[in-house]
């Protein structure tokens, strides 16, 4: 009986290598196959039956097929095979090997694309920073130029007055002897120096909203850094000598870093000043104590909240959202009392008329007056031809003002679906409106009711309701005006603009009386309850507090 022959691993590997080489298969794949043979025999043992030679030869032929089917447009074939491990060549068929190489090529391409995007992003950030620096330099030059022109104009007027007086003394104008007349006093805007201003620092991004407590010296601010802050402003004059205010940081995120989806977009104090409501880009409303403790989180909206208002009684909180709805929350249970789904586009603003009825406006150009418990709107106003940015009820709840991207401000009453007044003097979008705290039923019953409208045309217009006409055109800003606010006595108006200027106006005279230049665009201005301090929030992450004395 013949004893079966055997062959050592080295002899087998040599035979495989010589067979493939003599057959003309000199590709790198066969070098890998040869290496794989060594690994294979090391694993399976020192002796391999001769039949294994057939398997190795079949593998070599499969490599030829694999090479023929490779997509070599993007990578060289040798590079494709470099993705494979020696053991893969022995243990996997052609389709598996193709899949392995395809996946690894895709991963390399993804990594290359990711690296390219990161480099592009870094370049864009550098270009944006550079452009912002250039813009800031240009704005600084514009401010210096304007201040220089104002001084030159003032000097010219002064010289003209002197020359006129001298000519009259010399009898150039003829006629009778001039009478001693006391000139009418003129308002000259005084610059508020930075040393008279308290700058509150701590926010890590733009500050979009600010509001004084109605009962104390607490000031709330909301920012794009996903926090709100409650500042305890000390009594006494503002400025560098003022004691640093105590502050509570109201975090809208969990963890060490903020989340952009939780930017604070709006905030409002209840009438007692005990609770602060904040609305966030994540669609949630949050209720905080005046000490900064989170009391409740109201989660029902499916989009960012852009407006949030307490009713006067404090038993309802109203929210308006990008999800096209408004929700009335019962503050005793913090449950949704009723959700109003009348708009066909995002709701931009909400405002209470009284404790149970309110108005909403939207990018769908519509305004609805609603009532808690009612399934349909009380009124639907369809007069605007553009997005309605803001709505406000007058102090008595009898007149509703609205402003729009169509450049108009309109006055509505519940007696009619058509507007009472249609003010069209602005030439660009009107961003916000405010009523004066005056007329019958207010603390200033002897002053007329006035509406202020602020526009992207850089102007503010004051409208008198008794006659339904323009009272004053306040032309002092150089860029869009984002916010206006009347003093509690109704005699003064504060305005904030993207031109970085906070202006204070006399309502009666329509004159600019004080101005402050900050370090960024102003998103909101507000007065404290005494009317002796004004707060403004800026795009450079700060909040400023200014004393007001006449």
Image (cartoon, grey):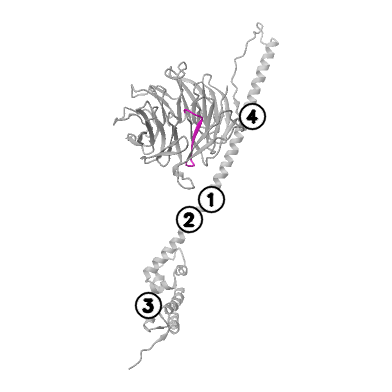
- Which residue does the numbered mark 3 point to in the structure image? 58
Question: Cβ–Cβ below 8 Å for labels 2 and 3?
Answer: no
Cα gap from disc 2 to disc 3, whole angstroms? 40 Å
Q: Position of residue 165 (x, y in %)?
A: 67, 14
Relative side of 355 to 38, left or right? left
Residue beneath disc 4: 148
User: Which badge, 1 or 2, is on the more N-terminal residue?
Assistant: 2
* Alpha-carbon span between mark 1 and mark 4: 39 Å
Q: Are marks 1 and 3 in contact (CB under 8 Å)?
A: no
Which residues fall within the magenta stretch? 214-226
Disc 2 marks which residue? 114
Q: Position of residue 91 (x, y in %)?
A: 38, 73
Can you name the residue that lies furthest to the bottom here? 1
The tag earlier along the polypeptide, 1 or 4, is 1
Q: Nearer the viewer, mark 2 or mark 4?
A: 2
Q: Secondary structure at mark 2?
A: helix
CB-based contact (under 8 Å), mark 1 and mark 4: no
């Amino acid at each position: 009986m013949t004893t079966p022959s055997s062959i050592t691993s080295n002899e087998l590997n040599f035979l495989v290598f010589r067979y493939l080489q003599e057959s003309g298969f000199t590709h790198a794949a066969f070098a890998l196959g040869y290496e794989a043979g060594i690994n294979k025999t090391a694993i399976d043992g020192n002796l391999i039956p001769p039949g294994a030679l057939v398997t190795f030869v079949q593998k070599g032929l499969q490599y030829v097929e694999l090479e023929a089917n490779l997509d070599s447009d993007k990578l060289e074939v040798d590079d494709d095979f470099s993705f494979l491990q020696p053991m893969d060549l022995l243990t996997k068929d052609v389709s598996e090997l193709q899949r392995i190489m395809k996946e690894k090529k895709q991963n390399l391409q993804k990594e290359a694309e990711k690296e390219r995007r990161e480099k592009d992003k870094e370049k864009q950030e550098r270009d944006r920073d550079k452009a912002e620096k250039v813009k800031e330099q240009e704005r600084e030059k514009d401010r210096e130029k304007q201040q220089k022109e104002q001084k030159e104009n003032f000097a010219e007027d002064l010289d003209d007055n002197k020359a006129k007086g001298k000519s009259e003394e010399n009898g150039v104008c003829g006629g009778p002897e001039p009478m001693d007349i006391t000139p009418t006093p003129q308002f000259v805007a005084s610059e508020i120096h930075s040393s008279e201003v308290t700058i509150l620092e701590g926010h890590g991004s733009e500050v979009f909203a600010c509001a004084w407590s109605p009962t104390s010296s607490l000031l709330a601010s909301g920012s794009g850094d996903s926090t709100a802050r409650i500042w305890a402003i000390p009594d006494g004059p503002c400025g560098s000598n003022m004691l640093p205010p105590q502050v509570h940081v109201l975090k809208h995120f969990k963890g060490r870093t903020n989340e952009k989806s939780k930017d604070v977009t709006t905030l409002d104090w209840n009438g007692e000043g005990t609770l602060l409501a904040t609305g966030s880009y994540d669609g949630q409303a949050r209720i905080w104590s005046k000490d900064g403790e989170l009391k409740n989180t109201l989660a029902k909206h499916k989009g960012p909240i852009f407006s949030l208002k307490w009713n006067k009684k404090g038993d309802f909180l109203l929210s308006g959202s990008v999800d096209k709805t408004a929700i009335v929350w019962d503050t005793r249970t913090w449950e949704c009392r009723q959700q109003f789904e009348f708009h066909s586009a995002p709701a931009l603003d909400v405002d209470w008329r009284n404790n149970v009825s309110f108005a909403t406006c939207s990018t769908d150009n519509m305004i609805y007056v609603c009532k808690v418990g009612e399934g349909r709107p009380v009124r639907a106003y369809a007069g605007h031809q553009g997005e309605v940015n803001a709505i406000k009820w007058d102090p008595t709840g009898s007149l509703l003002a609205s402003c729009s991207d169509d450049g108009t401000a309109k006055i509505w009453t519940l007696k009619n679906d058509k507007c009472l007044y249609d003010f069209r003097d602005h030439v660009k979008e009107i961003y916000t409106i405010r009523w004066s705290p005056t007329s019958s039923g207010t603390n200033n019953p002897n002053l007329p009711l006035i509406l202020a409208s602020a526009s992207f045309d850089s102007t503010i217009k004051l409208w008198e309701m008794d006659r339904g006409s323009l009272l004053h055109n306040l032309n002092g800003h150089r860029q869009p005006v984002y916010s206006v606010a009347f003093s509690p006595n109704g005699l003064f108006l504060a305005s904030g603009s993207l031109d970085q200027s906070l202006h204070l106006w006399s309502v009666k005279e329509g004159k600019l009386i004080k101005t402050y230049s900050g370090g960024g665009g102003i998103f909101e201005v507000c007065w404290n309850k005494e009317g002796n301090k004004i707060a403004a929030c800026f795009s450079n992450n700060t909040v400023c507090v200014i004393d007001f004395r006449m």
